[in-house]
Amino acid sequence: MRNSPFLFLVAGLMILLDVYFFQVVKMLAGSAAPRTKTILYTGYWILSVLVIVLLFVLPYLQLDNLRKGLRSTVFAVLVGLFIFKLFACVFFLVDDMRRGIQWLWGKFFFAGAEMGEPQASPRISRSVFLSWLGIAVGGGLFSSLLYGFSNKYNYRVKRVSVAFPNLPAAFKGLKIVQLSDIHSGSFTDKAAVRKGVDKVMALKPDLILFTGDLVNNKAEEIVPYLDVFDKLQAPLGVYSIFGNHDYGDYVQWDSPEQKHQNIEELKGMHAKMGWRLLWDEHVPIEKDGQQFALIGIQNYSALRNFARYGNLAKAYAGAENYPFKILMSHDPTHWDYEVRPKYGDIDLTLSGHTHGFQFGVEIPGFRWSPVQYVYRQWAGLYKEGRQVIYVNRGYGFLGYPGRVGILPEITLLELA
């Protein structure tokens, strides 16, 4: 984002919000003592200017891994302050619209009868209630973002039972652990990450499947955690695929060769951990003389902003005769775009990618996240006819170093 016009646009918007928000601050502090007003006003503008300065400075800072976590936290606080003011100003705007309508009504509909011309109506004061309500709503969102910092390693096990009539008898009761979106480049607490792996192994899975985004950008990010994730083991194996972040598409490389080398290094990291990376291919999973096909493809998205590296036709070729099929495909938009229309005999698709936006509400009978306006399948289990997709909410985090409502997930799928 360095030297980006977008950055200047955001800064300009923040200044406008600061000026608009300050009008409400002055109104609410109207009855305060002069000294209190001076302290309040000075503090407000010092904080506002500091936020904008940090917005420009942070992208230039080159920090090691430990302080990188601090940088992410600071950036999240800045974004939180912006959201706080933005939502509060929505309420202020509603109040100003109310005042404007009242002013127009008084000016044109209660004009003096003698001259037949509009008369000035009295000044309409701003609503204290709506002003405090706006601050309360914005402050509530900001507080939830701060609280979410404590949830980034709060791994939750989601237990899901799925029945398939064509599942071979040997695999009835099969326990599959799905992990996705580890994003090791965001981690700063190795002990906490290890506790998540311990949770996985305590489930005693028969098969472990990882559905992409092991790193944020570079293969080197997983190196400090090789001795953590190599503890993931299962009788039927550990299998993995690439997600959109694993190709290094979001950083600048000195040459195409350097980018290619990074991809090859990351492939090697999967092997070092004992994971079998599936690269547009399928493998048989066998138990008690019976088999099903496990298909794994590279990242493939129906959205223009994400790359299409995967080749499902290549991966699927030869899998036709297996009675049951599981597909690992990182981006859930692939399911509606290609899997369902062309491969109706793929029984179960496992995806990730969305992170559930790392923000939302999940309570019994209701769930919501802003990400649902982009992704039709964004978290959990979905069925269409005889086909099923499960979208994992992600093990790690990216950008915002926290989770609000949508917690990091370890999925335990039990086949029936």
Image (cartoon, rainbow, N blue to C red):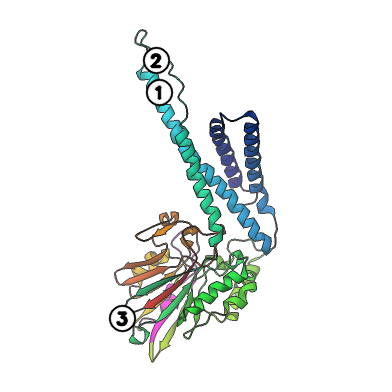
**Residue 291 picture location, percent across and down:** 39, 86
Residue lying at 37% horizontally and 8% vertically, measured from the top left: 115
- For the question of whether residue 104 can be seen, the reply is yes
**Rendered view: 334 above or below 112:** below
From the viewer's perspective, is 169 left or right of 270?
Answer: left
Residue lying at 63% horizontally and 48% vertically, measured from the top left: 55
Of the image marks 3 and 2, the number of the one nearer the N terminus: 2
Query: Which residue matches tag 2?
Result: 118
Name the one closer to the observer, 59 or 259: 59
Q: What's the magenta region? A: 291-320
Nearer the viewer's eye, disc 1 or disc 3?
1
Amino acid found under the numbered disc labelled 2: Pro
Name the one closer to the observer, 151 or 252: 151
- Magenta residues, dominant SS class: loop
Local crowd size for mark 2, using a 10 Å CA cut-off: few (<14), some (14–19), many (≥20): some
* Alpha carbon distance from label 1 to label 3: 69 Å
Q: Is residue 212 magenta?
A: no
Query: Which residue matches tag 3?
Result: 166
Name the one closer to the observer, 237 or 416: 416
Q: Which of the 4 image quarters holds residue 273?
A: bottom right
**Rendered view: 226 above or below 140:** below
- For the question of whether residue 318 can be seen, the reply is no
Amino acid found under the numbered disc labelled 3: Asn
**Residue 255 picture location, percent across and down:** 66, 65
The reply to whether callout 1 and callout 3 are in contact (CB within 8 Å) is no
Amino acid found under the numbered disc labelled 1: Leu
**Number of numbered discs visible in the structure rendering:** 3
